[in-house]
Image (cartoon, helix red, strand yellow):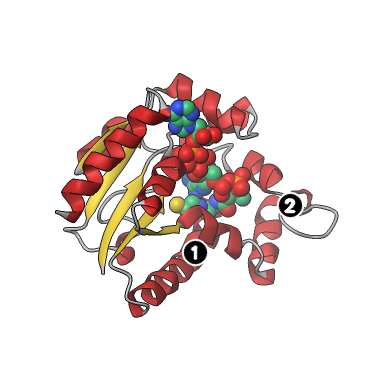
Amino acid sequence: MKRCVLIGGIGSGKSTVSRMLQEHGAACVDLDDCGHEVLLNPTVISMLTETFGEDILDAQGQIDHAALAQKAFATPQATVRLNAITQPRLLRIAQKRLDDLEADGCAIAFVEISAYDGPDGTFAPLFRTDDAVISVTAPKRLRIERAIGKGYSEQDVRNRIARQVSDAQRALWADFVISNKGTLADLQAHVDAIWKKITA
Ligand SMILES: CC(C)(COP(=O)(O)OP(=O)(O)OC[C@H]1O[C@@H](n2cnc3c(N)ncnc32)[C@H](O)[C@@H]1O)[C@@H](O)C(=O)NCCC(=O)NCCS
Ligand SMILES: Nc1ncnc2c1ncn2[C@@H]1O[C@H](COP(=O)(O)OP(=O)(O)OP(=O)(O)O)[C@@H](O)[C@H]1O
């Protein structure tokens, strides 16, 4: 199975690119989604409440994502603590999803990684060093606007951006950079061209 890595900061358009790639026939493993599964684990819930306090829970005792985000993205140290609890576990879920796709005969899979920290970083077990990396970028102003449109508060988006690497850093790691500052039709054309190159 050919694997590719799809990276980009909050509101850049990764999920939209992922949807377009899936329409071409690719499978996608979204690490944000794997992370959401981790937050349902009772051990993780206790570790997170011990670290960040009981007020990250909703009335049902489940993690309130916005409440946890407010605490966990407030400082670099808090984000390190969040990542240490969640990322080793979400990595195992993502690895299993990739293994299952491969066993099912999937030809090409994209791993969508919003918190990508480089080829030798946390997510290295999920890909090989020669797998293509696609970075989706957009000006900060547009990313904030788009993320607010998805329901995040402006402060939350700004905090998350502050905890993420820059588009300039992502470009150094990428084989393809998609600049997503135009229309959805522009984005589609860009994705179609990359799909052709990747599958040539
Ligand atoms: C803090 C949580 C509960 C907020 O949940 P919420 O549903 O609001 O956001 P979601 O998980 O869908 O992420 C949305 C975006 O936030 C940003 N983001 C999420 N986690 C991180 C992180 N650890 N570091 C930097 N940015 C992050 C990304 O741009 C991501 O696309 C959740 O993001 C979380 O548990 N994060 C830690 C796990 C993780 O690292 N996930 C990203 C894997 S690549
Ligand atoms: N070129 C575009 N023109 C107009 N709207 C766009 C464009 N690209 C993305 N969007 C919209 O912007 C929002 C953010 O895009 P998307 O969800 O794909 O980003 P993301 O990088 O996956 O974000 P997140 O980090 O929150 O997961 C979505 O509502 C999407 O429909």
Residue that appears at 28% across and 67% down: 107
> Front-most of 90 and 75?
90
Element type where label 1 sits in the image: helix
Disc 2, disc 1: CB below 8 Å? no
* Badge number at residue 90: 1
Query: Which sits earlier in the primary sequence, circle 2 or circle 1?
Result: 2
Q: Quadrant of the C terminus?
A: bottom left
Q: From what the image shows, is residue 64 above or below residue 40?
A: above
Q: Dividing the picture into quarters, in which one does residue 63 lie?
A: bottom right
- Residue 29 lies, in percent from the top left, at 43, 60
Q: From what the image shows, is residue 26 above or below residue 157?
A: below
> How many other residues sit within 10 Å of disc 1, few (<14), some (14-19) or many (≥20)?
many
Query: Residue under circle 2?
Result: 53
Tell me which amino acid carries mark 1.
Leu
Q: Quadrant of the N terminus?
A: bottom left
- Residue 108 lies, in percent from the top left, at 29, 63
Q: Nearer the viewer, mark 2 or mark 1?
A: 1
Check mark 1 vs ligand 1: CB closer than 8 Å? yes or no: yes
35 left or right of 8? Answer: right
